[in-house]
Amino acid sequence: MKKVDTLLVGGMVLTMNKALDRFPDGAVAIQGDSIAAVGPAEVIRAEYEADEVIDCRDQFVLPGLVNTHTHMAMTLLRGMADDLRLDVWLMGYMMPTEREFVSPEYCRLGTQLACAEMIRGGTTLAVDMYYYEADVAAAIAEAGLRAVCGQTVLKFPSPDADSYEDSLAYTRRFIEEWKDHPLIVPSVAPHAPYTCTDEILQACADLAVEFDVPLQIHISETRLEADESWEKYQKRVVHRVADLGVFRAKTIAAHCVHIDSEEIIALAKHRVAVAHNPTSNLKLASGIAPIKEMLERGVRLSVGTDGPASNNDLDMFEEMRLAALLIKGATYDPMVLPAKDALLMATRWGAEAMHLGDITGSLDVGKRADLIVLDRDPLHNAPKFERDPNSAYSQVVYASQASDVQHVMVNGQWLMRDRSLLTLDADQIRREAADYARRIDAFLIAREGNVLNKLVAIGGLEQEESFEIQVKARINGDGEDLIRRLLDHPSVEIVRHKHYRQYDTYFLFEDEQQGRVRYREDDLVSEDGQLVSVRTRLTYTIPEKEREFDEAVLLSRSRFIAPADRPLRFYREYFQARRECEVQKDRLRWHILYKGVLFYANLDRIVEPQVEARYIEIKSRTWSQKDAEFKAALTTEILNDILAIEQADRVRMEYVDLC
Amino acid sequence: MKKVDTLLVGGMVLTMNKALDRFPDGAVAIQGDSIAAVGPAEVIRAEYEADEVIDCRDQFVLPGLVNTHTHMAMTLLRGMADDLRLDVWLMGYMMPTEREFVSPEYCRLGTQLACAEMIRGGTTLAVDMYYYEADVAAAIAEAGLRAVCGQTVLKFPSPDADSYEDSLAYTRRFIEEWKDHPLIVPSVAPHAPYTCTDEILQACADLAVEFDVPLQIHISETRLEADESWEKYQKRVVHRVADLGVFRAKTIAAHCVHIDSEEIIALAKHRVAVAHNPTSNLKLASGIAPIKEMLERGVRLSVGTDGPASNNDLDMFEEMRLAALLIKGATYDPMVLPAKDALLMATRWGAEAMHLGDITGSLDVGKRADLIVLDRDPLHNAPKFERDPNSAYSQVVYASQASDVQHVMVNGQWLMRDRSLLTLDADQIRREAADYARRIDAFLIAREGNVLNKLVAIGGLEQEESFEIQVKARINGDGEDLIRRLLDHPSVEIVRHKHYRQYDTYFLFEDEQQGRVRYREDDLVSEDGQLVSVRTRLTYTIPEKEREFDEAVLLSRSRFIAPADRPLRFYREYFQARRECEVQKDRLRWHILYKGVLFYANLDRIVEPQVEARYIEIKSRTWSQKDAEFKAALTTEILNDILAIEQADRVRMEYVDLC
C-alpha cells in the first residue's frame, strides 16, 4: 500500500482530462501539492491509504473552476451603481470612486472578499486585472488561491500611477518580484486598445515577451469601440492590435464581443485566448459575443465573470451556465456548447488559455491538486440519471449552484471544508468591507450635484490627453511678424492653417474644487471671411496640478470633452453655475511640425471683453510624462531661440481670467 | 398594544407595493393568514406585540417570488436529456417517457419535489401546467404553496386522456372540485395553438369564461410555430388565437418569443398576461422574446422558469436576473428592465398577471402573508450600499442566490424556517425520485435502437391526427362503375381529383412493438399520363389500437410523418430493418364531401406484387373521438347505402400484408 495525504472516495469523478475520463464511483489520491492517482474507487483503495479519507458519495469531484477575467477588488463596488448608461456608470461612478478610494489597502481587502466568494463558489484559478497588483497578488497568495495577476497600464493617470511610464516601471518590478511564486503568475495588462496608445501596447508586449508572462487586454467590448477603431485607424480592433505585435505575447483577450470573421481567424491564428464574459456583456448592454464562430474556427475559449461591479458576483456556475444558454438562443442552435463543453471551458480550457494547462484544469496524475467537491443530489438537482454520460455534465452546468460546493482544495491545501473557509476570516472581511461601503456612500452623497457627475449624465464625455504643454505671451502689434518668424524658420513645417471665431462661455462654481465647464462655439472661417462650419463642445477642467518646466508651463490635469449638442440655454439651466463669463476671440491657428514634433501655434485677438489684447500660444498634448517633458524642452527652444520672447511678456493667465 | 401572531423586525423591508415603499429598518406584522401591518420597525413595535418575534437584521423581507409558467412534475425528468434538437428532445425523449411514466403518483411526487425546491428558492406562487392536475393541486396544497393549476388539453392522446374530449371533461370536474380552495386556483390549459384545433381552443375558452378561471397557453415559442401558423392560417399566432375568442378568458400566454409589433399591441389590448421564460427560450434555442417592446406597449409581463426539463431548475432568482440581463444585451440598452422592475416582474406583476394582485404579490396590509426573508449580507453580496434606493433591488436581482433564502411563509403559514422545510419530507421525496430516475434510465436503455427514436433524430417529424376512419373492399372488374355510383350520388360533392403512382417501401422490425416505417414516393400524374411532381415522405406507425365501429373499421393509432429528403438507400442503412417489403400501386383519388363532411375515396390497382387485385378505400381523419364516431357512421352509410358492398368483400388487410 502506498501512503498519500488524502483520499477522496465514492464520488462521481469528472476528470475533464483529454480522454474525458469519468468514474461514477471514483477516487482521487492527493500527495503534497499534487494528484497521485485518479480512477475507480475500488482500484485506488486497493493501492493507496491515507490518514484523511473523505467520503464523497452523492457528490461530484471536479477540477476547480477557472475564471479567466475579473477585477477582484471591485467587490467593494458591487451594486453601488447599476442599470446606468455605460459612460455614466464608468465616468460618473466607477472612475471617480476608484480615484478617491483605490489604495494598496483597498486592493487587499477587496481581493480578500473576492477570494472568500470565489472559494465558496468553487473557483480555484482566477485571472485578475487591476491596480496595485502586488497587493492583489499578496492577498490571493495568502488566501491560497491560484491566479494570474495583471497590472493595469493606461494612457490616463490611474489610481496607482501618474503616467503610463510609472505603470510600466511598477509592472516590471511586480513581475520580477512574483515570477517564481508557486501560486501566482504575474502579468501585464494594457487595459484596452482605446485606452492605450500604440507605444503603450508595444511596450507592454515587449515586457510580456521579455519575461515570458501573459498579457491581458480588453478587446472590442462595445460596438462604439469597434466603430471608433475603424474611424481612427481604418483597422478593426483585433487587426490593429495584431499589427502592433501585441500577440507576440501570450495574450488573454477579454470580451471580444464586436469582432468579425476575419478578426476571429486572426485570434485563432495568433493562438490568442479569449475570455468570454456573458453576464457583464449583457448587463452593460455591450452585446452577445460570437462564440459559436470562435469555437468553429478554433479560438481558445474560456469564461470569466468580469468584475463584481458589472456582474454583480463572481459565480462561475452562473457564468458557465449563461455561456452555455446564451449562445444557443442567439444562434437558434440548441446543440452548440453542450454542457460538457461549457464545463471544459470553465476548467481545462481556461487553464490552457492561461498556459497553465500542464499544472491545473483537470484531474490528471502529476497535476497540482486544484479540485472541488460538489453536492450531486440537492433538491434543486434531483433526481440524477446515469444512462447518458452527458447527464452528469448537465447536472453541473444547468442546475448546480455555487452553494452546492462543499470542499475546495488548491495546490494540495484545503481552502474550504464543509463550506467553512480555512484561510480567510469572513466576518472581519465583511466588517471592513461594510466600513468602506459606508465611506463610499458618504463620498458619493457629498458629491451629489458635482459638475463632472452632471456632465457625465449627459453622455458623450471623453478624457483628453493627461499632459498639456502650453506657453502663452502677450504681444504688441498684430503679431504678424512674430508668427512669420516662426513659420518661416527652417526647422518648422506647416501642416495646416485654420481661422476660427471662438465664442466661449465659462461656467464657474462656488466650490473651486468643482472645476469649471467651458461651452465653446467654434466658427470656422474661410480665407474670404465666410463661415464654413460651426462646432460646439463642452470642456470640463478640474483644478489643475501645474508643474513649471523651464520657461514653459507644463500642465498635468484632467480635461474632459464632450460634443455640446444642446443649446447654451440648456447648459445654463442644467449646471446652475454661480457665475458665467464670456470670452470671444479671433484665432488664427497653425498645426506645425518643429523638428518633426507636432505643435499648435495660436495667434489670438480678444474681441470680448474689450481688452485690446493679442496673444500668441504654443501648445502640445500627450499621454506620456516623458514625452511631455521632451515637448516642454522643445517649446522652450521655440520661445527662446525662434520667437525670442521677453520674460516679462510671458503670461500664466488663462482667457477666463480676463473677465 | 395589539396582539398578532408574528412580527418580523429589523430587516430591509421591500414591499414592492404601488408606492414602492421600502423600510430600511422595517417590520411586518402577521395575523392569521394576512399582513396586519408594515412599516418602520419603531412604529410597528410600538403598536404590536407577538409571541413569535423574528430578528431580520442584515436580511431582506420581501413578498415571495411568483413563477408564472412551469411544469412542476417535470422535475422527475431534470437533466435526463439535454443539448438536443427540439424535435429530438421532445418527441424522442420527453413525450415517450411521459407516455410511459406519467401517472397520478408520478405527478404527485414530481410536484412535491418541485415544491421543495421552490420553497427553498423563495417562490410562494407558481403557475403550473401539466397532466393529472388534480393530483398536482393536491400535492401543492399539501405543501402549503399557492398556485394556479392548469390541466393540459391537447389534440393528441395524452398521458391522462385518450382524446381532448376526455381532457375537457376532466378539466371541468377539476375546476368544479378546486375552485374555492384558499391556495389553489384551477385553470384550463390548451397546450398551444399548434397542438390544438380551433374547436379545442374555443372549448377551453368557453370553459374558462364559464367558471371565470384563468386560461394558460404556450404562444409562439419557436420561429417554426410562427412560420407554420402563417402558412396554414395566413395569420400570425396571436391573431389566430385572438380571432378564435380565446382572449375572452383571463389568459396567461407563456413564451411569446416570435411575436411582432402588431401581436404585441393585440396582447396589450386584450390584457393578456405574458410569462417570459428566458432560460428555457435560450436552452431550447427558441430565441429572445421582445420584452422591451412588450413593456413599452403596456403588456402585462411576468417571469417563469418553464419546466425543469428545459431549464433545468426552478430558481426564480436566476430567472429574474436573466430576464434583467438578457434584454439589455439584446437591445443594447443598459437601462431597460432595471433591477427594481425585474423584481416587480417576479413579485407583484406576476400576481397581477394571475389576477391575484388583490391577495398577494406585495407586502400590503390586508393581503395574504406570502413572504420571504433573504440574507442581505452573504460574502457574494457584500458590501451593501444605502445611498441609492436602487442598490437594494440590485442586491436582490443581480447577486442574491436561491440559497440565501432563510424563511418562507405562505398564507400566514411557515413553510421553511432557517432553510428547513416544514411541510415536506425532503429525504423521502429524494429517495422516491431517485427510484423513478432508475426506472426511467432502464426504460430508455431498453429502447435504445428504437425506431421512433431514430426517426425523430432525423428531424421534421409530426404527429398526425389521432383517429383514422377507414374502410376497404376488394372489387371485381376495374371499379369504374362503383366509383361512378359514389361520385354521381346526390349527397356527394367532388372537391378534387388526383392520379398517383405510389412506390412504397415498408421497413419491418424484429420486435413488432417497434411499429413500422413506410417510405413512399408519390408520383402525381396528369390526365395524359405525364409526371407532374414527385413527393417522398416517411410515415411511422406504432402498433395500432383498433376499434371496430359498425361495419367500418375505426382506427385509433399514433402515426407520425416526416418529409423524406434523403435517398431510399440512406433510410435502408439507417433503420437496419429485419425485412423490407415493396408495394407499387396506381391510385385514383377523390376528395369528396358527403353530407358536407370531407372523405377521401381511393381506387387502387396493385402493380407490385403482381396480385391482380383492385381495392376501393373510403377514409377520413380527425383529432376528436366524437368526430371519429360520427364519421364512422357516415362511412357505414356510404358503404351500405351507396356502394352496397357485400360483407364478404370488405377487408381488414393493409397493403403491406400483400408481400
Image (cartoon, coloured by chain):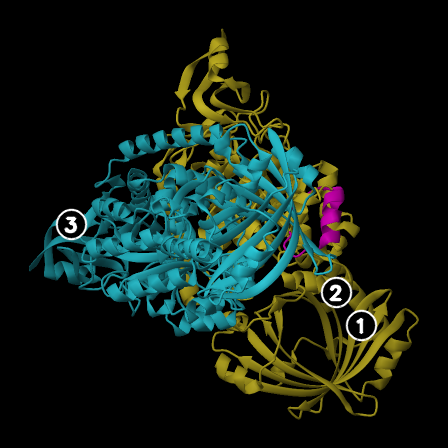
Chain colours: A yellow, B cyan
The kind of secondary structure element at disc 1 is helix
Foreground disc of the pair 3, 1:
3
Quarter of the picture holding the C terminus of chain A = bottom right
User: Which disc number belongs to residue A639?
Assistant: 1
What percent of the width, then of the height, locates residue A469? Answer: 72, 67
Report in which chain the residue with disc 1 lies: A
Q: Earlier in the sequence, mark 2 or mark 1?
A: 2
Where is residue B375 shown, x and y percent of the image? 31, 48
- When the figure is inspected, residue B168 is found, relative to residue A398, above or below; the finding is below
Q: How many marks?
A: 3
Q: Which residue is mark 3?
A: B53
Whether labels 2 and 3 belong to a single chain: the reply is no
- The type of residue carrying mark 3 is Val
Do residues under tags 3 and 1 come within 8 Å of each other at their CB atoms?
no
Is residue B163 visible from the viewing direction of this image? yes
Q: State the extent of the magenta-drawn residues as a range.
A: A247-270
In the rendered structure, which amino acid carries the disc numbered 1? Leu
* Residue type highlighted by circle 2: Lys
Residue A380 on the magenta span: no
The stretch drawn in magenta includes residue A264 = yes
Q: Which residue is mark 2?
A: A232
* Quadrant position of residue A593: bottom right
Where residue B596 sits: x, y (%)? 45, 66
Query: Label 2 marks which chain's residue?
Result: A
Q: Is residue A221 left or right of residue A56?
A: right
Residue A386 to residue A226: above or below: above
